Image (cartoon, rainbow, N blue to C red):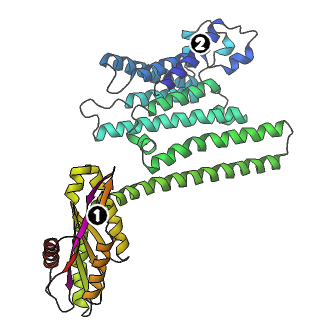
Amino acid sequence: MRLVFPFVAIAVACLALLSWAFGDTAAGTVAFEAAAQPVAAAGLVVLGVGVLFYQPHTAPQRTRIIGTILSVCSVGGGLVELNDTFFATGLGLTSRLFPHVPLQYRPAMAPNTAFCFVMLGMASLLARPPSRDPNGYVGNRLVTGSQALASLAALIAMLAVIGHVYHAGSFVAIARARPMTMDTAFCFIFLSIAVLQIHPTRGLVRYVTNPGPGGYTARLLLPVSLLLPVGLGWLRIAGMRAHLFEAEMGIAVSALLNVVMLFSLTLLAARTLFQMDQKPRQVEAELIYRATHDSLTGLANRAVFRDQLLRRLKVARNRRRSCFAVFYLDLDGFKQVNDVFGHDAGDRLLIDVADILRGCTRAGDTVARFGGDEFVILCEEIEDRDDASQMAARIVAAMPRRFTENEKSVPIGISVGVTINPAHANETTPDDLLRQADVALYRAKSRGKGCYEMAHA
């Protein structure tokens, strides 16, 4: 994309040179007044080729040398024309390089045009940081200076474009010197953009090209802030000249359109920035969820359950009448389901069991998968052992007795071990409670499965 802009500038300058070479000066006075001066067109070709030849990390050394020589020629030509304009030394390049051009079209180059040649030539040279340390302090400062000069040249050319659009002579020319033509101004803008794109991730340009919210906002608002006022102003002047409305109405319409466009862009930027701000939060929330939940069932994982159990033990120590229960559950017949129906069917069974456990517990309880076909439940508040045994019986009753698929059936069930943390047990640890519940689960398995057992007091 960077190569498009110098190619366009070179093509426009070549067309101007062809018009001077083959045009009819007697019949085309208006066209020649609007066309780039021959030496300016030739300078644009030289500068465009110089910018085109410099491609960091890809262009051969010989190509870079040619680009450097052409940029030096651009700076030298601009300085010669400035000297001829302000000091009338008679060293103008037009008479020497284009003697066939009629005298009335041989004034010195426009000062702002010559100044842009000097700045863009210097910008192209500064864009070549030292080879020993291209990314060091000096290299970064040179790149920043190059982009600053290119931006200033683009601003001067933009002033000329505005002057032509609004017929403001003071924007186009300095004092009574020859004005910068419209095609020359656009070529300078294109070449300035090409120089700015030489190092798109360094210097001043990185504030616009970075993928963050600031870069997005700059890319959205910068073109509009440059083009919208010029376009709306031109429409207002054109309407007034066509007698479509008076000056006051034109100003009012222009102000209204500015408000509407800027308000719409502000809303669009705010919406996009909000979405960009929410995306990292969503990613962070998803990472936290994956770190704290079982990926298959969506239940809490072992680490979260232990944290919740430790927290509940601290609460129980501070509240003497606080009592809670821990349930240790294991599926019956899970291995047979995997053997007969495959592991996909086993995963579906685990998901169904998780849904059953959610339905049998209360909102404040914690249900977790410990791994494999083992589950645990932290029942936050209970009155006594009867409350815990009722919940265990409800879980056992809710579990289906057989798993059926494709006309095959395997007996299943769930065994539950329950332990109670009494209010007076101040030295109990999470491992103690899990061990007691596991022992009770083992007794339930030994008793015939599909039942529950309470841990001994």
Residue 174, visible in the rendered structure: no
The answer to whether 427 appears left or right of 370 in the picture is left
Closer to the camera, 55 or 149? 55
Q: Tell me if residue 126 comes above or below residue 247 in the rendering.
A: above
Residue 329 visible in image: yes
Query: Which sits earlier in the primary sequence, circle 1 or circle 2?
Result: 2
Q: Position of residue 8 (x, y in %)?
A: 54, 22
Give residue 438's quadrant in the image.
bottom left
Residue at (28, 34) in percent of width and height? 134
- The residue under the point 46% across, 46% down is 215
Coordinates of residue 85 in the picture (x, y in percent): 58, 24
Q: Horizontal placement of 130 versus 25: left or right?
A: left
Report if residue 412 lies within the magenta region. Answer: yes
Task: Determine the CA span between mark 1 and mark 2.
Answer: 71 Å
Q: Which mark is residue 157?
A: none
Q: Where is residue 119 drawn, in percent x and y? A: 47, 31
Q: Secondary structure at mark 1?
A: helix
Residue at 31%, 68% (x, y): give it: 399
| Magenta span | 408-428
- What label does residue 292 carry, if any? 1
**The residue under label 2 is which amino acid type?**
Leu
Q: Secondary structure at mark 2?
A: helix
Q: Residue furthest right?
A: 243
Label at residue 17: 2
Q: Position of residue 329 (x, y in %)?
A: 22, 70
